[in-house]
Image: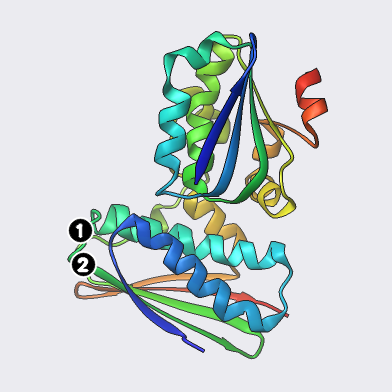
Amino acid sequence: MKVTQQSTDNTLTLSLDGELDASSSVLLDTELTKPEVLNYQKVLIDCQRLNYISSAGLGVFISHLQQFQDAGVKLVFFNMQEKVHNVFEILGLDALMTIVPSQAEATAI
Amino acid sequence: MKNAIRISCNRSNLKVVRDFVSTYLAAYSLSDLHLNQIVLAVDEVVANLIIHANGEDESQHLDLRLNVENQVFGIEIEDDSKSSYAPSTYREPDLQEHIRTGKKGGVGMALVNRIMDRVEFSTTGTHNVCRLYKKIA
């Protein structure tokens, strides 16, 4: 899986390309653990090319969420494919994380 | 159609397993969503066996066998680890607690139990077999 970054003054956008499993989740965890991530007001996760997520990938987001909230960083997912969104729904994680349909909505939060 | 594979206990083989299951089920006209759910459930069990039961020891391997009978997809996943999963130890994860404590793992079996119709783990000596079943039509 590839992670590409784009940033403005207050927003970091990470675009995930590929499959987020127990192998590739390590890469994402490294990115989200960088101290500078907490300087942003928003971290947006572009899921347009995210084709798959397993519990390892979910766990990376779960494990960073409280720290983000404590630092005032909003974590927002957008452009999620239906089969990926379904995995969040199976666990009820869609109620605990912010998932919106489009980049425009993500930016507006 | 290949219905059996052996993989070594390396997490890079998770993709091999997912592709193996997807390819096998391609003949059965499942929706993307349902296919993804089955692939995910298998991935979760295999990941646990590779990482936790076998400590990512590449000298160890897992054997997987698939079939579809009477519109039910079944998979057997076998390993020889001395450590085996006991379904009786399963507890529903408290996701809000996971978030509060920054917990990284522990939701894999919740996905398996919700997705699959039947989940069985058995051990004979040090030979372990996990069987998962799901109706696909």
The residue depicted at 64 percent of the width and 91 percent of the height is B70
Please name the colour scheme applied to the rendered image: rainbow
Q: Quadrant of residue A12?
A: top right
> Measured from the top left, where is residue B6 in percent x and y?
32, 76
Q: Quadrant of the C terminus of chain A?
A: top right
Q: Mark on residue B57?
A: 1
Q: Quadrant of residue B45?
A: bottom left
Q: Is residue B132 left or right of residue A87?
A: left
At mark 2, the secondary structure is loop
Q: Amino acid at mark 2?
A: Gln
> Measured from the top left, where is residue B53 in percent x and y?
27, 58
Badge 2 sits on which subunit?
A: B
Q: Mark on residue A13?
A: none
Q: Quadrant of residue B105?
A: top left
Whether residue B112 appears in this view of the structure is yes
Q: Are marks 2 and 1 in contact (CB under 8 Å)?
A: yes
Do badges 2 and 1 share one subunit?
yes
Badge 1 sits on which subunit?
A: B
> Measured from the top left, where is residue B50 in percent x and y?
31, 59
Q: Amino acid at mark 1?
A: Asp
The residue depicted at 76 percent of the width and 21 percent of the height is A107
At mark 1, the secondary structure is loop
Q: Mark on residue B60?
A: 2
The residue depicted at 71 percent of the width and 43 percent of the height is A80
> Measured from the top left, where is residue B31 in percent x and y?
74, 69
Please say if A70 is above or below B11.
above
Q: Is residue B104 left or right of residue B133?
A: left
Please say if B118 is above or below B112.
below
Please say if B98 is above or below B24.
above
